[in-house]
Amino acid sequence: MGSSFSLSAYSGSSAAVPSPGLGDLPESCVASVLVYLDPPQICQMAMLNRAFRGASSADFVWESKLPLNYGDVIDRVFERDDDGGVCRGLCKRDIYSRLCTPNSFDGGTKKVWLDKRTGKTCMSISSNGLAITGIDDRRYWSRIPTEESRFSSVAYLQQIWWFEVDGEIDFPFPAGSYSLFFRLQLGRAHKRFGRRVSNCEHVHGWDKKPVRFQLSTSDGQQATKQCYLKEPPGKWIQYHAGDFVVSNSCKSIKVKFSMTQIDCTHTKGGLCVDSVQIYPAEYGDRLRRF
């Protein structure tokens, strides 16, 4: 019995010690690796274990994903309250999450957000935020509610001689290259028995003369393009107006843009104007139509 007891005691003392795993890594080391991943990858890694979850919340990880001038963007977009702003007290991860949600400003006529994967700035300006010649005259224009616009309505042109749409934005865009587009549709879409139907009743005049798109910035950049609006009716198209480059994130840049067809020898009509959209230039390559 004595020998049996001794053998059991000896066997128990030599039990295998568990090997170190990912959960044993210091959070600071994990965070130093996560900083090289993009935000969706960081969120996936946070589900591995407690160490990765804690490291994924580190401020320096998410600050590396935010624009360098994110403070200026916050001041421009959000109305500051007595506590110093809507983002006061939030960690950098929560600030990133808040900025990735389309945020309205300038009376709801504009929305800005960060791309969730890259952290780059995107913007949309509604037809309500544009200066449209004749917009208040119901003989020419009308506002149409629709689910196909992120602003829930579009400007619809029935018929006009002088077509002109102008706009501008003064904003602290982070440094980089940007493309500007007009989101347009020939014809008027509506639902009939649950199906989307396009009404082309008023579409005319766009094949006679090209539409001119112009863009200029406060630092002297300019771009001009012309094209005929000849895409199939009922289809939303992003018409590329031009590109601009922001070299200094420390100050705002003013961008002016327009879309005109002012040849008064004929009328034109049947056009929906939804918005003007600004994307990083590398995204714009997928949207260009001419």
Image (tube, rainbow, N blue to C red):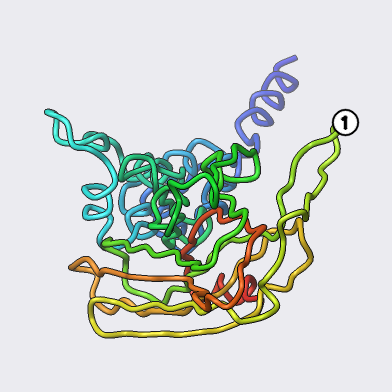
User: Circle 1 sits on which residue?
Assistant: 193
Quadrant occupied by the C terminus: bottom right
Q: As drawn, which residue projects farthest toward the top? A: 1
Q: Residue at x 68, y 59 (%)?
A: 236
Q: As drawn, which residue projects farthest toward the left? A: 82
Left or right: 114 as drawn, with respect to 2: left
Q: Residue at x 84, y 35 (%)?
A: 192
Residue 32 in the image, given as x and y percentages of width and height: 39, 59
Left or right: 135 as drawn, with respect to 227: left
- Asked whether residue 82 is in view, the answer is yes
Residue 114 in the image, given as x and y percentages of width and height: 44, 54
> In the depicted view, which residue is nearer to us: 87 or 31?
87
Residue 26 in the image, given as x and y percentages of width and height: 40, 47
Q: Residue at x 56, y 72 (%)?
A: 284
**Number of numbered discs visible in the structure rendering:** 1
Q: As drawn, which residue projects farthest toward the front? A: 265
> In the depicted view, which residue is nearer to us: 239 or 166?
166
CA neighbours of label 1 inside 10 A, class few (<14), some (14 to 19), many (20+): few
Q: Secondary structure at mark 1?
A: loop
What kind of residue is marked 1?
Phe
Where is 184 relative to 213, above or below? Answer: above
Quadrant occupied by the N terminus: top right
Where is 212 relative to 71, above or below? Answer: below
- Asked whether residue 20 is in view, the answer is no
Left or right: 251 as drawn, with respect to 201: left
Q: Residue at x 51, y 79 (%)?
A: 212
